Image: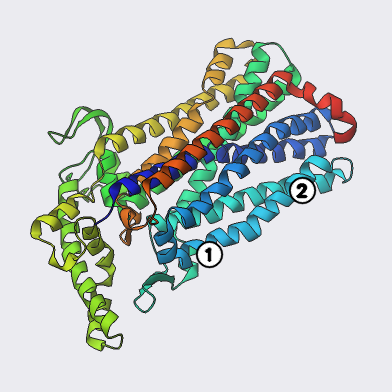
Amino acid sequence: MTDMTLVDLSRLQFALTALYHFLFVPLTLGLVFLLGIMETVYVITGRAIWKKMTQYWGVLFGINFAMGVATGVTMEFQFGTNWAYYSHYVGDIFGAPLAIEGLMAFFLEASFVGLFFFAWDKLSKGAHLTVTWLLALGTNLSALWILVANGWMQHPVGSAFNFHTMRMEVSNFYNVLFNPVAQAKFVHTLSAGYVAGAMFVLSISSLFLLKRKHIELAKRSIIVAVAFGLAASLSVVVLGDESGYLTGENQKMKLAAMEGIWRTEPAPAALTLFGIPDSEHEKIRYAVRIPFLLGLLANRSIHEPIQGIHELVERNRGRIVDGLIAYDALQSLKQEPNDKKAQTKLEGHVDNLGYALLLKRYRDDILQSSPAQIQQAAEGTAPKVSPLFWTFRIMFACGFWFIFLFVCGFYLVTRQRIATTPWFLRTALWSLPLPWVAIEVGWFVAEYGRQPWAIDGILPTFLSTSSLAHQDVLWSIGGFVVFYSILAVVDVFLMLKYIKLGPDCLEPTSSNVG
């Protein structure tokens, strides 16, 4: 039986490091594209103000980029230290995109970031602009391969179980790469990063205008930020709709928990805009619903019902029972690998083998599991409703707030009133944390909603950990907290320092940066 304390500690450590790392990733994704746009305008117009903008926002990008690298490296090591069985069981598949990311995208990104900062006087305008856009390409490619790996965890395609090696192995890398869930996550995550970058530039520029400093740089920065941010925020909503549809297709339990649907919702299913989930009585109190919308988002139909948690638990119970047939055949193949009858039996039921492994939480000899244990394992496939219900709606509300804010900003820019509208500038400044709030809760929805699976339907989370002592994980958590706290202090100090200095920070090195 599994030591759940070790599992919980390992999950806590990975969650802390992942959420902290992702404070920096979105800003990197967004700022680098804004740098490309600003420098493009500089090359086209030859106006020095646009070069100064590129260099100033580049300083803040550089601080954030360094922090992202420092916090990202530690995450990949955890697959070997804390999640050794996970790495053994699915490493052939999961490791491939991570290796490609390191060999191709990361080195591309790391090479061009140096040229971006130190080659202003050594390259022509066009060559340096090319460097900036290649840096943006490298950054996006890094995100692509990471999200291909994560998308496979959500929707494992292009792979098969090999009973000879007792591992999952790649059967079709094309399907892994072009996994629809991975591609939807990629473009949705990029758009969210673009929103974060645009909001950052808008908020800091608004601060400059409120203080009546660096007015020309701030006004032009806001023009770029609101136009780019409006396009990105609209993309987030559209691409989020595609993610919702794929969730309805491939992760029905996550959808049911997000919407608080305990019993199957008949068609046409309504979307609960707001309400208070009552898990004890299995209902949403004070619900405000939009007719037809959930059916359109999740099924692209107003004629299909949305399955509820209880019905999905019952379906999973059947999959556990079916998976036990595969597990029984696997035990025979361990004794006699050439047993054709057992091979046939395994092939016929292998799709549900992972569901049988859920019983490992309750007993080692799962073939002797009682009906009560099978039912308990089935009920364990349903995540808690309240955390998913609320975090999804926080993300949803933030998305529409960004559209409203960027529309207002775009209107004020076109009317040339942005510098004389203090209420908007203050609103933009105080909205600075919201993209990170939306992004972090979005990742919570994606990862918590997948539980109890590390690989959906394939490998339970509690079977994925390394064999470690509790105190070892506690020490590593403590070490990460101390290390990341120091990094947080350094990051905040440097960001505040260069925000306070504004573009004046470029003056001491003007001879070097042009």
- Answer above or below: position of 482 versus 323: above
Mark 2 crowd level (few <14, some 14–19, many ≥20, 10 Å Cα): many
- Answer above or below: position of 354 versus 476: below
**Is residue 249 among the parts visible in the rendering?**
yes
Name the kind of residue labelled 1 in the image.
Ala
- Dot placed on the residue nearer the N-terminal end, 2 or 1: 1
Mark 1 crowd level (few <14, some 14–19, many ≥20, 10 Å Cα): some
Name the kind of residue labelled 2 in the image.
Val
Q: Position of residue 482 (x, y in %)?
A: 53, 34
What residue appears at the point 20 percent right and 63 percent down from the top-left corner? 319
Helix, strand or loop status at disc 2: helix
For the residues marked 2 and 1, what is the alpha-carbon distance in whole angstroms?
A: 27 Å
In the displayed structure image, the side of residue 442 where residue 26 appears, left or right: right
Residue labelled with disc 1? 96
Residue 429: which disc? none
Residue labelled with disc 2? 131
- Answer above or below: position of 272 versus 104: above
Q: Position of residue 210 (x, y in %)?
A: 64, 12
Q: Position of residue 334 (x, y in %)?
A: 29, 80
Front position in the image: 373 or 121 = 373
**Is residue 292 among the parts visible in the rendering?**
no
**Is there CB contact under 8 Å for labels 2 and 1?**
no
Helix, strand or loop status at disc 1: helix
Residue farthest to the left? 371
Instruction: For the C terminus, give its image quadrant.
Output: top right
Q: Quadrant of residue 155?
A: bottom left
In the displayed structure image, the side of residue 497 where residue 288 appears, left or right: left
In the displayed structure image, the side of residue 370 where residue 13 appears, left or right: right
